[in-house]
């Protein structure tokens, strides 16, 4: 407990005289499993979310994938409105089509505003109607101070959110979509012959970082919602109003480091009690060391979107698999790059039973130990 107090004081001291005077600055560090707040400054101040808005756009897209309203291979038509969106954008042209898989991949990496409008119109009829759905979903999730007016985060004076609300949304994405969450770990995405690097540089610079989203407009400063997992613990850290992308990334790194140190100190002070974000896995018996170390592979494909489509269809076919984490690991072989589509982290018995059910539904699969399958989720 004392370590947590020291952690919070250090965070506050580090901000005095610089960013705390900026009304846009806000930050929060949350234990993703319990929801416990480890640090907060201006966490309930309403700010412009910028492209953090796309987290909710993706949340609703994931819901649509799970309900069958969308399919990753489905082609969506680009309207004149979508084609006219301001950068950052793909440069989509009116009348062309783009697959749902490519929309998601480019939203996560390029933060493409035209792609955001495409999926908003597909699901809501118009972007304005979709924004109303976004706001209602925010309220359902407990985001009490958030209002959306578009799907991208482009400037709108009534589109506001808070650091606390964005942490709530990040926790919901991790909790509700473990089978889609790996999209946020994609470091780069190839579309129409161009390779787009993820704006979230912490994915390659911070140990355990696996998402989620950056955001910037002039009115907001540099925003970031970051998620990282270490030693069975996951932290969500949100920063609004960074002075630059480099400053924001360094600041989030410091907050993350102090958060993990505080969690580690709590575990040590509690002795055998594990202050993990997720409930700790039971210690296996000596003869059952593979309790949760098995996976189902449903194929290897030459495109990321095709691999994700296959694993999503398999999960839908056996509803018990919808909450099982997904791994899509790329490997280069004699025939080029292949993406292995797998559902991971199951007991051997569950993996075998589920695979048998899939085969009965004419879905090919094999059961593999995780050590053989690898768990580099979303690698591309």
Image (cartoon, grey):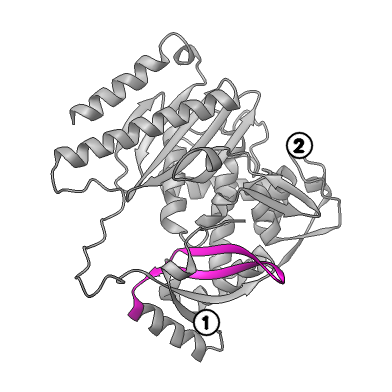
Question: Looking at the rendering, which quadrant does residue 197 occupy?
Answer: top right
Image marks 1 and 2: residues in contact by CB distance under 8 Å? no
> Does residue 340 show up magenta in the picture?
yes
Q: Nearer the viewer, residue 40 or 373?
A: 373
Residue picked out by circle 1 = 365
Query: Which corner quadrant holds the C terminus?
Result: bottom right
The x and y percentages for residue 161 are 51, 34
Position of residue 48 in the picture relative to residue 281 (left or right)? right
Which contiguous range is marked in magenta?
324-349
Label 2 sits on a secondary structure element that is loop
Which circle marks residue 103 in the picture? Answer: none
Identify the mark at residue 87; answer none if there is no mark.
2
User: In terms of secondary structure, where does tag 1 sit?
Assistant: loop
Please give the name of the residue rendered at 43% of the width and 58% of the height, measured from the top-left corner: 176
Labels 1 and 2: the sequence-earlier one = 2
Residue 45, percent from left and from top: 45, 25
Q: Is residue 75 above or below residue 31?
A: below
Q: Residue at x 35, y 18 (%)?
A: 12
Query: At 44% from the left edge and 87% from the top edge, which residue is drawn?
Result: 356
């Amino acid at each position: 407990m004392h370590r947590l107090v020291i952690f919070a004081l250090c965070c506050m001291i580090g901000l005095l005289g610089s960013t705390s005077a900026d009304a846009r600055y806000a930050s929060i560090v949350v234990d993703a499993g319990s929801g416990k707040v480890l640090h907060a400054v201006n966490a309930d101040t309403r700010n412009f979310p910028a492209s953090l808005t796309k987290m909710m756009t993706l949340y609703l897209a994931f819901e649509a994938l799970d309900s069958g309203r969308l399919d990753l291979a489905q082609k969506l038509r680009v309207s004149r409105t979508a084609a006219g969106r301001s950068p950052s954008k793909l440069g989509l042209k009116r009348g062309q089509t783009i697959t749902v898989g490519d929309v998601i991949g480019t939203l996560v990496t390029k933060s493409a505003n035209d792609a955001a409008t495409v999926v908003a119109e597909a699901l809501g009829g118009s972007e304005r109607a979709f924004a109303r759905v976004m706001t209602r979903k925010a309220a359902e999730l407990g985001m009490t101070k958030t209002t959306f007016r578009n799907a991208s985060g482009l400037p709108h004076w009534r589109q506001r959110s808070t650091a606390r609300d964005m942490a709530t949304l990040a926790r919901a994405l991790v909790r509700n979509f473990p089978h889609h969450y790996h999209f946020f770990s994609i470091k780069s995405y190839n579309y129409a012959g161009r390779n787009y690097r993820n704006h979230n540089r912490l994915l390659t610079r911070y140990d355990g970082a696996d998402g989620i989203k950056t955001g910037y407009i002039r009115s907001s400063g540099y925003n970031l919602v970051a998620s990282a997992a270490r030693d069975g613990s996951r932290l969500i850290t949100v920063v609004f109003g960074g002075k630059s992308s480099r400053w924001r990334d360094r600041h989030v790194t410091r907050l993350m480091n102090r958060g993990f140190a505080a969690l580690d100190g709590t575990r040590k002070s509690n002795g055998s009690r594990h202050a993990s974000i997720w409930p700790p896995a039971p210690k296996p018996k000596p003869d059952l060391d593979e309790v949760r170390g098995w996976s189902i592979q449903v194929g290897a494909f030459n495109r990321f979107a095709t691999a994700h489509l296959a694993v999503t269809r398999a999960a839908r076919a056996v509803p018990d698999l919808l909450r099982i984490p997904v791994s899509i690991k790329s490997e280069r072989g004699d025939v080029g790059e292949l993406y292995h589509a797998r559902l991971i982290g199951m007991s051997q018995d569950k993996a075998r039973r589920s695979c048998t059910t899939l085969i009965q539904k004419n879905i090919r699969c094999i059961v593999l130990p995780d050590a053989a399958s690898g768990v580099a989720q979303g690698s591309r």
